Image (cartoon, helix red, strand yellow):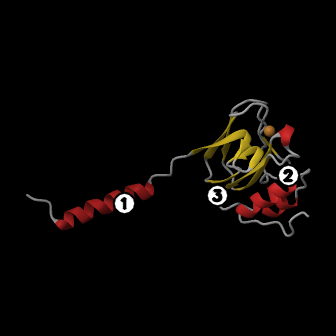
Amino acid sequence: MRPTFAMAVAVAGVLATLAAATPATATDHQVKMLNRGAAGMMVFEPAYLAVQPGDTVTFLPTDKGHNAEAIAGMLPDGTDGFKGGMNKEITVAFETQGIYGYKCAPHYAMGMVGVIKVGDGGTNADAAAKTRHPGKAKKVMAALLGEAGNPVAALPK
Ligand SMILES: [Cu+2]
């Protein structure tokens, strides 16, 4: 018996249902730590990421002399920060929705910071936007929070 059009439609419907029922697999995103990137000297690349809960981000010591660590005040309530060692690759799992800010400790004031938005951004955007930063990090962080859809009220002059 030749398959009928109705059968083909029924099979397609079952496949679509299976696809919808299967949880999305976690994705690992990669961020390079660079002496020079598209945005200038001492940067994370990409410095802004939007990920889904359950995804991981791996920070790669592509160039030497950098680390990746969470910025106090830029974490959703109830989450632990993370702190990678100098010249060390670190993979961080992001389970809780929210805005996460991070820095390279030696180059914080040079603007080596990044933002990861998990899910819909959660409820800590205001707290994250009020966090103070040294030097060039003020301006870079304001731009990254803008990319996350949470522009700070006034860009630092
Ligand atoms: Cu650095």
Residue 114 image position (x, y, % from top left): 75, 49
Q: Secondary structure at mark 3?
A: loop
Camera-nearest label, 2 or 3: 2
N-terminal of the pair, mark 2 or mark 3, is 3
The CB of the residue at mark 3 lies under 8 Å from ligand 1: no
Q: Secondary structure at mark 2?
A: helix
Residue at (78, 66) in percent of width and height: 151
Measure how far apart labels 1 and 2 are at the Cα level: 46 Å
Residue 14 image position (x, y, % from top left): 32, 59
Q: Amino acid at mark 3?
A: Gly
Q: Nearer the viewer, residue 37 or 151?
A: 37
Camera-nearest label, 1 or 2: 2
- Ligand 1 occupies quarter: top right
Q: Nearer the viewer, residue 41 or 49?
A: 41
Q: Is residue 70 visible?
A: yes
Report the residue marked by disc 3: 119
In this image, 53 relative to 83: left or right? Answer: left
In terms of image quadrants, where is residue 7?
bottom left
Residue at (15, 64) in percent of width and height: 4
Split into 4 quadrants, where in the image is the N terminus?
A: bottom left
Q: Is residue 154 above or below residue 117?
A: below
Q: Kindly identify which numbered label has been placed on residue 144.
A: none
Residue 47 image position (x, y, % from top left): 71, 50
In this image, 17 relative to 39: left or right? Answer: left
Report the residue marked by disc 1: 16
Residue positioned most to the bottom: 153
Split into 4 quadrants, where in the image is the C terminus?
A: bottom right
Q: Nearer the viewer, residue 113 or 34?
A: 34
N-terminal of the pair, mark 1 or mark 3, is 1
Q: Amino acid at mark 1?
A: Ala
Report the residue marked by disc 2: 137
